[in-house]
Image (cartoon, rainbow, N blue to C red):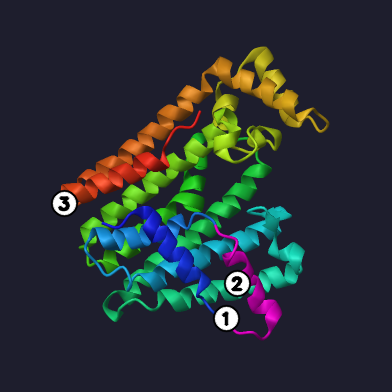
Amino acid sequence: MRKLEDLQLLIANSVSELKYPAYPAELYEPISYILALGGKRMRPALLLMACDLFGGDVEAALPPALAIEVFHNFTLMHDDIMDNAPLRRGCITVHEKWNQNVGILSGDVMLIEGYKLMMQVRDNILRQVLDIFNATAVGVCEGQQLDMNFESSNNIGIAEYINMIRLKTAVVLGGALKIGALIGEADQKDADLLSVFGEQLGIAFQLQDDILDVYGNPEKFGKQVGGDIISNKKTYLLIKALELVKNEQATDLDNWLAAKDFDPAEKVAAVTEIYNHLNIRQYAENEMQAYAEKAFEALEKINLPEENKQYLRDFADGLLVREY
């Protein structure tokens, strides 16, 4: 088994070798620009990892793995426009560097370039792989729309939230693993189980992200702690708090959510205190653990050598490392 870091490096090197036409420059330069901004390359590395787990040819899995990375960056390019984000990975976003129309059209062609790469799988699995890719892509769009809907809705339940993060984040992990397994000639049942493993793990990972946003160490988390509280983002923690909060604390929480002019540090401290009183962190950790266990249950049923299963367990443990 190749190490995950080696697979990520292989992807990074392969991304840097992707070539696009020079003309029209405004259409193609933004693609090379956003792909060069880096990132963990986790999604495509998962596709290679799944192929490797079943003894497949990792080189043959490279084009579809790159397809996943190109698709992921296409979604980021369009997300940045929707969010009016000035920066992506510390660099100026495509729509700010060029303009919004360039960001839209360049993103469109990126999606097509992703399909061109995905179509380089062998013919006997092409239709099935494209079906998985289509379902994954539609899921991500549905998840993004739900996330935007949640911004203006005040009665989101936990089940709706879990479904949103499943679509927006987790289906890509499941889809990448399933495609990689099929390229590695896994049977249908094992490919399906690996997809379940990835999806459940993806939900657990997003729940961990919600927890770390409030309780993480800023140096290790790499983001501003409390950013979700400041922006009233509908996370598991906020939704659970709104479900449980009563009396004076309910009024306090509503006031903080409605406040337009506030001291960010004061808001983070006040809302975190409400979370602590309601034991929200424990609820969130229990939920995260429940999805991690579902992932491991699926993993146990996969017909793989024990050492390969252990590789996946170690990967999952590494992804869900607790930095509080």
> What crowding class fits label 1: few (fewer than 14 Cα within 10 Å), some (14-19), or many (20 or more)?
few
- The secondary structure type at the circle numbered 3 is loop
Residue type for callout 2: Ser
Q: Which residue is mark 2?
A: 32
Q: Which percent across, then down, holds residue 41?
A: 47, 58
Residue 304 seen from this side: yes
Instruction: From the top left corner, tell me how far across and down residue 263 is, in percent.
Output: 79, 27
The residue lying at 38 percent from left, 78 percent from top is: 120
> Residue at the spot x=58%, y=50% of the render?
146
The disc at residue 20 is: 1
The residue type indicated by label 1 comes to: Tyr
Q: Label 2 near label 1: C-beta < 8 Å?
A: yes
23 within the magenta span: yes
Q: Which of 115 and 320 lies nearest the eye of the viewer?
A: 320
The vertical placement of 143 against 9, above or below, is: above
Q: Is residue 175 visible in this depiction of the protein?
A: no
Q: Position of residue 59 (x, y in %)?
A: 33, 72
**Residue 249 position (above or below residue 137):** above
Q: Which residue is mark 3?
A: 305
**Is 131 located above or below residue 277 in the figure?**
below
Q: Spatial distance from mark 3 to mark 2, Cα to Cα?
A: 39 Å
Q: Which residues are magenta?
A: 20-38
Q: Earlier in the sequence, mark 3 or mark 2?
A: 2
State if disc 3 and disc 1 touch (CB < 8 Å): no
> Residue drawn 52% across and 70% down?
16
Neighbours of disc 2 within 10 Å: few (<14), some (14-19), many (20+): some
